[in-house]
Image: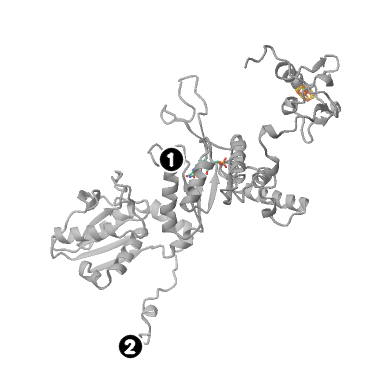
Amino acid sequence: MNRDFRGKTLAEEYRQPPFTPPWWLSGPHAQTMGGKLFRRDPDISLQRSRIDTPDGDFLDLDFTPDPDPTSPLILLLHGLEGSSRRAYMLTAYAAMLAHGMAAVGLNFRSCSGEPNRTARLYHSGETEDMGFVLKTLSERFPGRPLGALGFSLGGNVLLKSLGESGEEASTALQAAAAISVPYDLAAGADMLELNFSCPHMTVEGSGMKVSHAFALVEEFTEIVREAVSIPIIAKLTPNITDINEPAAHAKSGGADAISTINTVSGLIGISLDDNTPLLNIFGKGAMSGFSGPAIKPIGLRCIAQLAQNEELALPLSGIGGIETWVDAIEYMLCGAATLQITTGVIHYGYRIIEDILEGMAYYLEDQKVDSLSQIVGKALPNIVPTDEFDLSRQGVAQYDLDRCVGCGQCYIVCQDAAGQCLSWDDANRRPVMDEGKCLSCMICSFVCPIGDPPLINYKEVKNKPEVIPMRSAPCRG
Ligand SMILES: Cc1cc2nc3c(=O)[nH]c(=O)nc-3n(C[C@H](O)[C@H](O)[C@H](O)COP(=O)(O)O)c2cc1C
Ligand code: SF4
Ligand code: SF4
């Protein structure tokens, strides 16, 4: 190991003393917000210059005023989802100018305010564009010393480019510095979920439209599969005829798992005052994503459909309307190995996760089951097509009238939508059942307000003749 005259290694020489924050900005959150709140954006007029790239696209550069045509010119690279006009970039330009240097900010693709033409984006390992810009600058300003400064993702790009160029880097750049570089990118994600399911995206080949174009599901999954080694999950839309079709293509593309559902396409309502959709932006609304408890039946159905598909045989992540431990267990019984919650957390906060976990733990104890994995898919054998129902078994609705509150809901529904087997005892405010006419449709049990345990239950009756529902008009074939 090389040591200098003081006997220190290079690393020891440049080791920073431990960071000591100022007393008035001690916590990391305060420091993060401090920059945002206290920094005053310098007023610098930037001049935009567009250059054409070899792949038929463009890159937008923003130049500061030039203090001296012979001064160093510093290329600045912004961070993820930033642009060359972000506050930290402006502050850096001001510092460069104060030291007599000119600066130019590179806007990574689609970050300059205008989407790029080609389906190609920037990322922390994409160094071609930076190399092309440096070459362009050295041709446009021959002999002028060039430097580079990268922030965050821009720092990744810069350092990777320097590493790739090796010894040649010093001929293109006289100086380079990187700030706040994420150095362990892999630590940022244990797995990736590919959103092929957002109903809000309008561009073809994005969001939910990917789930509709099965070849794209496969192609996009393949691209990610080739790029990363961590597990990838394809998130599919319920707004489709058969969810198994995109799932099969995701599997062919290399997906390790499927998650579903994203939001259900819906329209919440219309204001009768001004005919604007509810949830609107300055009067205009869209058919957009509907979430929460109302979509749980759709989520359960999609998970069960995927879980029953033996050819798919991929782990499933259940989403849609989960708010309680009962919802969570139901999803697992239908085949979900993991669960995701959005609206529940938006509504009640992250604390509901604790409640859900506690409830699930009690459930396992109650069921004498050691691990959740043992309950995954347990309900699937009982979810069958309707033609597999055993219609030879008949029964009636059984009422525990001691608990009846006399609301009359059962009578109304049975009269107007079911077997008309109930009459109403006005004096006692109670339904009176004619069991022989009961269809055992159980609609009355859905409307009865008394639950836990339900007041109205199904009772099997041996040898009961099949009841043919009364029709107002004969069925025509
Ligand atoms: C406010 C909001 C933002 C969402 N953003 C995303 C998103 O960026 N990507 C995504 O895949 N799904 C997104 N979703 C969909 C949810 O992840 C989830 O699939 C859907 O809302 C159904 O689950 P839930 O009923 O628990 O909300 C969003 C949902 C909501 C309500
Ligand atoms: S089960 Fe159907 S037919 Fe029987 S009482 Fe209830 S609503 Fe009426
Ligand atoms: S719906 Fe339930 S509570 Fe209401 S009258 Fe019928 S049985 Fe009684």
Q: Which residue is mark 1?
A: 213
Residue 235 in sight here? no
Kindly indicate the quadrant of the structure image that contains residue 342.
top right
Q: Secondary structure at mark 1?
A: loop
Pick the quarter of the image with the C terminus: top right
Task: Pick whichever, 19 or 398, lies toward us.
Answer: 398
Kindly indicate the quadrant of the structure image that contains residue 399.
top right
Q: Amino acid at mark 2?
A: Phe
Q: Say which residue appears at 41% left-offset and 53% top-offset.
A: 223
Ligand 3's quadrant is top right
Q: Give the tally of numbered discs.
A: 2
Pick the quarter of the image with the N terminus: bottom left
Task: Pick whichever, 326 or 2, lies toward us.
Answer: 326
Q: Is residue 405 left or right of residue 310?
A: right
Image x and y of residue 334, in percent? 65, 44
Image x and y of residue 265, in percent? 50, 33
Task: Pick whichever, 223 or 61, lies toward us.
Answer: 223
The numbered disc on residue 285 is: none
Q: Residues within 10 Å of mark 2 (few under 14, many from 20)?
A: few
Image x and y of residue 291, in percent? 55, 37
The numbered disc on residue 5 is: 2
Q: Amino acid at mark 1?
A: Ala
Mark 1 beta carbon near ligand 1 (under 8 Å):
no
330 over 453 or under it: above or below: below
